[in-house]
Image: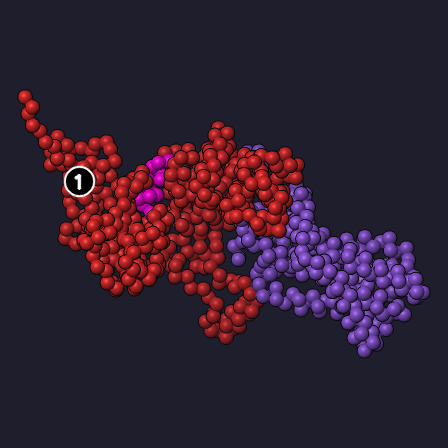
Chain colours: A red, B purple
């Protein structure tokens, strides 16, 4: 198999706006300030970026740094990395929405990219008209669209409304039609950016199916996603981007996903702090999520399966609400949810009475229940039957810990066994003879 | 940097690389996307057609009222001579021509801003957008031109001193030139507006100034002799005057003026395309 995409020494620089402020008046202002030897009133301060010194070079910011990548024909490549790692920049360059600063990308065959579905849909036009418009925008000729029109309409499932202006469509129909056009592009190389995160569950399944179909037809697909399970399901290879560089590249997708899951931050550890004052909610705003040992100190490294690990959730409660639920979800290394727990799980009489102000919820992780391995613990919070305050799965505060050793007191059980959990269960015996 | 480039084979279909040269213009690609230009035109036509009745009517009201105001202010009050042509027709001719150019310029100069949403998500040659704008504006022009023809026939039938000449046959050439000029200056300005966003707000004012530097509300004969050689650098002068020559048989325009006008039009178009192609690749970084 030969390479169909060759990314060679790719660099992308963004200017942090010292030159050119976007308006003529600002440029004149800065110039006038320089003339008078005063401080430039328009010089940009970028506190968010000061932490990433390695990528900031004067007024320049390197979104991609010397990326080299060969994608072979028929490969399904997953691109993962945390926000700001350079995934979107890479997609933008591949989609030719913006140009690289240095280096080049060579592509063999037709490349189509879906950074968004339904780009350029016009609300006044009918579904059919929008198919033609969107198709042309994606690079299909009129005849090509005509040939595939039937398939596109059938796949979208909006046959009955195809001659209705799309402004009357429900958002689900809109997305289905839009995805349908994109799905029938039939390029040799497809670049997808989390478009899977649209529509209802049923439609998502179909989208995944269609993507899988595209992939199984031997076409090359590049996917950027935060959904690790779809990456693992679809991809034959994965790369991990961090601070604009490829830090991991392997055909063992599972191992790359794990590395991402467990090294999400450099300081990924047993303590999470709400540094930027986010997750604001009157009824519950988390400040700190930490795992501590018996001594109250944060745990470090791995812990034994029989040692005490306490989950501490510090939060500010501005307004009391009896429907408040606070808890956590525990995932294993494969991303499977093992269990979730809330402080309201027991009988109502044993619930704590919550007061406003700074509060701490704490709970011990059951000893000798989990198996050896790495775990991720995500903070959850909700108002019972009303709303999620912190919804599971997306951008939750989380901490990571590892269990090693201390599986049992038995001399016969000292090594890791198969299984998601490894509880030590009491056994009884009686002689029946 | 280039010493560890892995592949040297030339069988790549597409190479994405930084914009380096000034003349990195891909017109072949534009041709491949000609269906898209058609779709944009169709989209704008359909949405125009689906508008309320006042939308299309506006295209008639606007030139009619402007012409009446011009006739009263510049004809009756300021008493600007109109080369013995009925003032109403004279002003309407200038207005219909200017209106096409002015609208095209206004709309194309805003290309990057109005389409930032789409441009940020999908690639296609960006030139397709301004080209489709100058094409769809011909619809507006046709409506207004028919209105002009109506009044023209009426005045002609009443025996007004207007005599059509064979130059009417050259009308399509004039329209094409206006389209090219509107496109050229429009994309030139739209490239500048990506750097200087406040230029957008000055556009209405600039277009109005340009109109007064064009013989819309006065004939070329009224321009002082010493100023004329500079004045004729404005390519719209020859276009408006040629139109009047064709329909009224009176104008001070000479053939070399037309040649100059075309040269400047093509120069502006060329500069516009060069600048536009350069900007379109990195435009998304500046929004």
Image quadrant containing the C terminus of chain A: top left
Residue A268 x %, y %: 29, 49
Per the picture, the main secondary structure of the magenta-coloured stretch is helix
Highlighted range, magenta: A253-264
Task: Tell me if I can see residue B101 in this picture.
Answer: no
Q: Residue furthest bottom?
A: B77
Of residues A151 and A230, the one nearer the viewer is A151
Q: Picture quarter containing residue A235?
A: top left
Q: Picture quarter containing residue A419?
A: top left
Task: Tell me if I can see residue B122 in this picture.
Answer: yes
Residue A342 x %, y %: 25, 50
Q: Examine the structure image and report whether residue A259 is included in the region drawn in magenta.
A: yes
Residue marked by disc 1: A368
Residue A87 x %, y %: 44, 46
Q: Residue at horizontal 66%, vertical 58%?
A: B107
Quick one: label 1, few (<14), some, or many (20+) residues within 10 Å?
Answer: many
Residue A411 appears left or right of A391: left
Residue A105 appears left or right of A294: right
């Amino acid at each position: 198999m030969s390479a169909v995409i060759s990314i060679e020494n790719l660099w992308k620089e963004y200017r942090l706006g010292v030159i050119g402020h976007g308006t003529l008046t600002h440029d004149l202002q800065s110039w006038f300030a320089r003339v008078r030897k005063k401080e430039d009133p328009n010089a940009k301060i970028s506190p968010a970026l000061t932490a990433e010194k390695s990528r900031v070079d004067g007024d320049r910011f390197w979104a991609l740094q010397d990326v080299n990548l060969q994608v072979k024909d028929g490969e399904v490549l997953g691109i993962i990395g945390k926000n700001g790692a350079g995934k979107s920049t890479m997609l933008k360059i591949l989609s030719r929405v913006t140009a690289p600063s240095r280096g080049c990308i060579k592509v063999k065959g037709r490349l189509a990219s879906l950074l968004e579905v339904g780009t350029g849909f016009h609300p006044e036009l009918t579904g059919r008209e929008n198919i033609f418009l969107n198709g042309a925008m994606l690079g299909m000729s009129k005849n090509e669209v005509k040939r595939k029109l039937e398939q596109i309409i059938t796949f979208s499932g909006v046959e009955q409304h195809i001659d209705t202006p799309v402004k009357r469509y429900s958002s689900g129909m809109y997305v289905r039609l839009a995805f349908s056009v994109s799905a029938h592009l039939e390029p040799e190389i497809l670049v997808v950016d989390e478009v899977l995160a649209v529509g209802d569950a049923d439609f998502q399944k179909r989208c995944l199916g269609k993507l899988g179909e595209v992939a199984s037809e031997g076409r090359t697909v590049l996917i950027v996603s935060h959904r690790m399970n779809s990456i693992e399901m679809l991809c034959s290879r994965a790369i991990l981007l961090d601070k604009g560089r490829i830090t991991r590249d392997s055909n063992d997708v599972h191992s790359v996903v794990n590395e991402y899951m467990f090294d999400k931050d450099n300081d990924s550890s047993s303590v999470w702090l709400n540094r930027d004052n986010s997750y604001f909610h009157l009824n519950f705003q988390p400040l700190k999520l930490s795992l501590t040992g018996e001594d109250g100190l944060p745990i470090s490294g791995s812990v034994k399966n029989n040692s005490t690990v306490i989950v501490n959730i510090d939060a500010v409660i501005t307004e009391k609400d009896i429907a408040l639920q606070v808890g956590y979800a525990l995932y294993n290394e494969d991303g499977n949810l093992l269990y979730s727990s809330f402080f309201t799980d027991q009988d109502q009489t044993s619930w704590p009475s919550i007061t406003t102000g700074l509060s701490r919820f704490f709970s011990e992780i059951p000893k000798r229940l989990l198996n050896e391995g790495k775990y991720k613990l995500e903070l959850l919070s909700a108002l019972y039957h009303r709303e999620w305050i912190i919804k599971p799965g997306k951008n939750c505060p989380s901490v990571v810990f590892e269990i090693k050793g201390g599986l049992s007191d038995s001399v016969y059980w000292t090594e890791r066994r198969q299984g998601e959990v490894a509880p030590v269960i009491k056994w009884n015996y009686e002689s029946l003879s | 940097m280039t010493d560890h480039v892995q592949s040297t084979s030339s069988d790549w279909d597409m190479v994405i690389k930084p914009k380096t040269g000034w003349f990195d213009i891909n017109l072949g690609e534009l041709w491949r996307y000609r269906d898209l230009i058609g779709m944009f035109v169709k989209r704008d036509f359909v949405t125009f057609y689906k508008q309320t009745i006042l939308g299309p009517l506006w295209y008639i009201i606007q030139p009619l009222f402007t012409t009446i105001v011009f006739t009263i202010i510049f004809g009756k009050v300021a008493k600007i001579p109109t080369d013995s042509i009925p003032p109403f027709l004279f002003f309407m001719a200038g207005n219909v021509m200017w209106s096409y150019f002015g609208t095209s310029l206004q709309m194309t100069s805003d290309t990057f801003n109005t389409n930032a949403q789409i441009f940020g998500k999908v690639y296609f040659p960006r030139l397709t957008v301004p080209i489709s704008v100058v094409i769809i504006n011909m619809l507006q022009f046709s409506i207004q031109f028919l209105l002009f023809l109506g009044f023209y026939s009426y005045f002609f039938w009443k025996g007004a001193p207007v005599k059509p000449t064979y130059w009417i046959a050259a009308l399509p050439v004039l329209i094409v030139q206006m389209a090219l000029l509107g496109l050229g200056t429009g994309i030139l300005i739209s490239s500048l507006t990506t750097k200087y966003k406040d230029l957008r707000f000055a556009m209405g004012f600039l277009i109005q100034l340009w109109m007064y530097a064009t013989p819309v509300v006065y004939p070329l004969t009224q321009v002082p002799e010493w100023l004329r050689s500079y004045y004729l650098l404005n390519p719209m002068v020859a276009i408006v005057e040629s139109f009047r020559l064709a329909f009224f048989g009176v104008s001070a325009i000479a053939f070399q003026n037309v040649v100059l006008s075309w040269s400047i039009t093509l120069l502006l178009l060329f500069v516009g395309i060069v600048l536009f192609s350069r900007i379109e690749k990195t435009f998304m970084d500046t929004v």
